[in-house]
Image (tube, grey):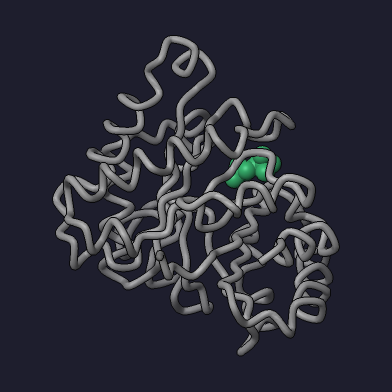
Amino acid sequence: MENRRSLIAGNWKMFKTSSDAIDTVKEIVRRLKQVIDIDIMIAPPFISISSVAYIAGQSNIAIGAQNLFWEKEGAYTGEISAPMLLSVGCRYVIIGHSERRQYFGETDETVNKKMRAAINYDLTPILCIGESEKERESKDTFSVLDKQVKKGLKGFSKENLKKLVLAYEPIWAIGTGKTATSNQAQEVHRFLRLLLEKNFGNMLAESTRIIYGGSVKPDNINELMAMDDVDGALVGGASLSAETFCKIVNFKR
Ligand code: PGA
């Protein structure tokens, strides 16, 4: 059937000082040395990317950023560009996380510009989408996701999107301990794959990894990963401990 390579990604958000980040990544590299059948990514805070990437080195742990700005350089105080991320060994970038949309004014339009920057510099973009609790209750989940995907990917060809990873993160499940059931995740991931097929064709839809995020833990990863259209996980809270994160990476397969 499908032959998409699974991706387990850790988003450390605004946690860990530089030395904590170094300690944790050392432990993760040590514990996961043998894992070669899936992709693993860690996104530390900006200030730790360089040292964490140095430690991860040639290991099987790839490094990502939690955000980027779309310009290459300029007078944009506080921002970080795609070439800067590349220069410190970053290969992935998380774009449009719901916390950025909620607290930092990101819109589908700015998300689209950030996607453009990531693609131009050959970073692997993890585009986050997801509905709020209210939207789910009023049965708007699919229309909300449809809009986020179409606007986020506006103007791109299927060639541009070869590296795209979609992260379905229902806002009501992030950091709340409420996970979507594996059936709820599967239903949405299926919908997203069909949406990709409609807009970019079957080949891209079949090869694009659609990962789930929202209270992923060692005790729910197996059932999520058993779903046909769930290709991995974006893990927040449970990625902060090397032990827990590694348990998730070692899901049953
Ligand atoms: P969580 O966060 O695992 O802590 O729910 C997921 C995310 O925000 O990516």
Q: Is residue 249 above or below residue 114?
A: below
Q: Is residue 218 above or below residue 121?
A: above
Which residue occupies the extreme top position in the image?
A: 138
Q: Is residue 199 above or below residue 207?
A: above
Which residue occupies the extreme front position in the image?
A: 1
- The N terminus lies in quadrant: bottom left
Question: Is any atom of residue 212 visible in this view?
Answer: yes
Quadrant where ligand 1 appears: top right
Coordinates of residue 97 in the picture (x, y in percent): 49, 42
Say which residue appears at 60% left-offset and 54% top-offset.
225
Say which residue appears at 69% left-offset and 51% top-offset.
221
Coordinates of residue 146 in the picture (x, y in percent): 28, 33
Q: Is residue 77 above or below residue 21?
A: above
- The C terminus lies in quadrant: bottom right
In this picture, residue 145 sits left or right of residue 94: left
Say which residue appears at 55% left-offset and 57% top-offset.
232
Say which residue appears at 17% left-offset and 54% top-offset.
200
Coordinates of residue 102 in the picture (x, y in percent): 50, 28
- Which corner quadrant of the image does residue 10 belong to? bottom right
Coordinates of residue 250 in the picture (x, y in percent): 73, 66
In this picture, residue 116 sits left or right of residue 249: left
In this picture, residue 50 sits left or right of residue 132: right
